[in-house]
Amino acid sequence: MPGRTRPIEKFAEAVAKCSAEASVYGKCIIADYNGVYKDKCLTEFMKLKDCYTAAAKRR
Amino acid sequence: MKPVSLRPFLPRPALRRRLPREFRHYALQTSGVPTLQVFNDRIKHLQRERAASDAEASRRVDYLRDEVANRLCERLLDITRHFPSVLDLGANACNIARALTAPNPDSPALSTRLSHLTSADTSHTFLHRDVDLPFNALLPAHTRTVLPPADTPLPFKPQSFNAILSSLSLHWVNDLPSLLSQINHILKPDSPFIAAMLGGDSLFELRTSLQLADLDRRGGVSTHVSPLADVRDMGGLLTKAGFKLLTVDVDDIIVDYPSVFALMTDLQAMGESNAALTAEKSGLRRDVLAATEGIYRELHGNGGESVPATFRIIYMIGWSEGDGQSKPLPRGTGQVNMKDILGGGEIK
């Protein structure tokens, strides 16, 4: 669809700017991937989420 | 007692009415056995129609289908025959037709070995996407047939094809046993069925990352990647459908993508998005998506800028029964003791 960016593309760009936070979060999860439970890595995820929301707003 | 004929008592139409030949089909499944529905056929159809309607994006993601079609057609090279009539079942964008016309360094293009190719698919848009491209002119004779919806019988007459090919579409079929036996019926005796389908651990990286992200973000797992048939099942299914001289093998194609988003965008453009009946209607949540990106890169990433995705392709060849095929001897007819040939002593 020319001339129109899909919302998901904007989101993907914003997440791509937060590779450091995403990496920290990913490492936290795979440290013990047989014992993942809800909100196991909540603090790491919130940092990632803060980063991509900010990145999405900047543009 | 004199036998009484029931004939005069029957209503006239019951005697006369007979279905035309085209509408008669083999009874393929014993009644009362329900088919297990895994995929939503309607959603799958809409996804494929939508994907094909953007021809440019759809052609950009043809890399997987073209590669598999080429590898599939290489297998056809091993059979030194001329095929008067060939069916491509689940043709997508006629990728097999294109692969058949591709120039071959050692021998003339494969399309010279067949007289008539029928490409059949349920999606009209997909089937006619490349109708104007030059490869169409290279085929001797080519028909595009739009198939009826997935659960209706195939509209072909019994024993009408000398070979049936199928590339990357069988993995969306709900009732694979029935389809395979229909394929066996529409093949002429002693003719090959050559197919490639996605199976086994395809996209296991995506599957596992999504599961981990789902567990952490939402505390449970949901179906985001459709289930696929296993290599071990295919041999059994082909045998049940009545195919002989089976060959089943597996090939992994690993594609590197810049990110998980790129992988998902490509899958969507191929029309290969999830269509499992148990899938959530709302789709993926953004939180889970962002989490998946982080986990995928750490768990499976190449360490640099790219992430790999594995496509496991199951290739299978089965032959319809015919005269002159070598068959296994009946049990107990062996004349030679295997121990005499292979050696080996007593089991201690």
Image (spheres, coloured by chain):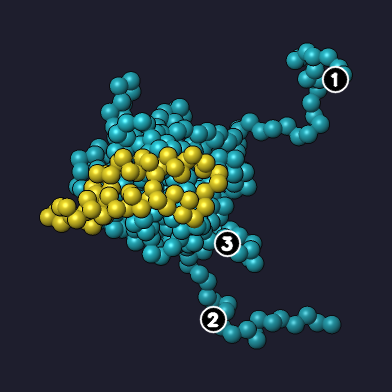
Chain colours: A yellow, B cyan
The residue wearing badge 1 is B347
**Could you tell me the amino acid type at mark 1?**
Ile
Q: Is residue B329 above or below residue B186?
A: above
Say whether residue B207 is visible.
no
Instruction: Say above or below: B88 vs B157.
Output: above
Label whose residue precedes the other's in the sequence (1 or 2)? 2
Q: Are marks 1 and 2 in contact (CB under 8 Å)?
A: no
Q: Is residue B227 left or right of residue A6?
A: right
Q: Which mark is residue B35?
A: 3
Residues beneath discs 1 and 3 located on the same chain: yes
Tag 3 secondary structure: loop
Please state the horizontal and vertical placement of residue B298, each as a whole percent of the image: 40, 38
Q: Residue at x 20, y 40 (%)?
A: B134
* Residue corresponding to mark 2: B13
Task: Please tell me whether mark 1 or mark 3 is closer to you in this view.
Answer: 1
Proximity of marks 2 and 3: CB atoms separated by less than 8 Å: no
Residue at mark 1 to residue at mark 3: CA–CA distance: 47 Å
Q: Residues within 10 Å of mark 2 (few under 14, many from 20)?
A: few
Decide if residue B217 is on the left or right side of residue B124: right
Q: Which amino acid type is marked by label 3?
A: Thr
Instruction: Give amino acid for label 2.
Output: Pro
